[in-house]
Amino acid sequence: MEKDKLIESLLQKVEELSKKLIALELENSQLKARLTKYETPKNSNNSSIPPSKDENRPKRKSLRIKTGRKPGGQTGRKGNTLKMVEIPDVTEEHIPDYCNCCGNDLSSLPHQYAGSRQVFDIPEIKIKVTEPQGL
């Protein structure tokens, strides 16, 4: 008799626990559904993860409309460069002393004008310090 009562009480407990388990599983699934609404997967746009670590990286497409032309200056385009000035600020003569190939001395030979080019440099910026003094 006592065994029957014990078995009956254990069966009752198992039934109660199984009902609790079903209720908890339902609540768990509901909470997971609510959590996915607020949870966003981390990627390089919303965290400090580098773009190379993104899973399923989105393919970024250029918004530029293709024209079919090659990149760079097009044929027929007139270039716009700095023009040479008539009187430069500094003129330097570059007369070689020796031959780069054989190393012979060239200082005694007459030299020939090969051409000119000009280099435009931006002057160095210097700080101007002013100290106002009141009397």
Image (cartoon, rainbow, N blue to C red):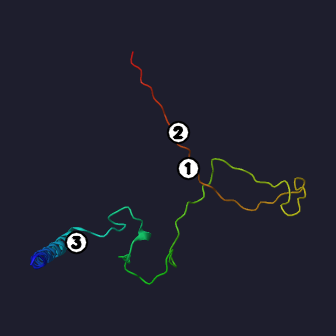
At x 42% / y 20%, what residue is drawn? 133
Callouts 1 and 3 close, C-beta under 8 Å: no
How packed is label 1: few (under 14 Cα within 10 Å), some, or many (20 or more)? few
Q: Quadrant of the N terminus?
A: bottom left
- In this picture, residue 22 sits left or right of residue 67: left
What residue is pinned by disc 3? 36
Dot 3 lies on which element? Answer: helix
Q: For this rendering, which residue is in front, 24 or 38?
A: 24
Q: For this rendering, which residue is in front, 63 or 78?
A: 63
What residue is pinned by disc 2? 126
Q: Quadrant of the C terminus?
A: top left
Measure the C-alpha gap from mark 2 to mark 1: 12 Å
Considering every residue shown, the one lying at the far bottom of the view is 68
What residue is pinned by disc 1? 122
The percent coordinates of residue 120 (x first, y second) are 59, 54
Question: Which amino acid type is marked by label 2?
Answer: Lys
The percent coordinates of residue 118 (x first, y second) are 64, 56
How packed is label 2: few (under 14 Cα within 10 Å), some, or many (20 or more)? few
At x 75% / y 52%, what residue is drawn? 93
Callouts 2 and 1 close, C-beta under 8 Å: no
- Give residue 9's quadrant in the image: bottom left
At x 21% / y 67%, what residue is drawn? 38
- Give residue 17's quadrant in the image: bottom left
Q: Nearer the viewer, mark 2 or mark 1?
A: 2
Q: Does residue 31 sit above or below 117 in this rendering?
A: below
Question: Which amino acid type is marked by label 3?
Answer: Thr
At x 81% / y 55%, what residue is drawn? 96
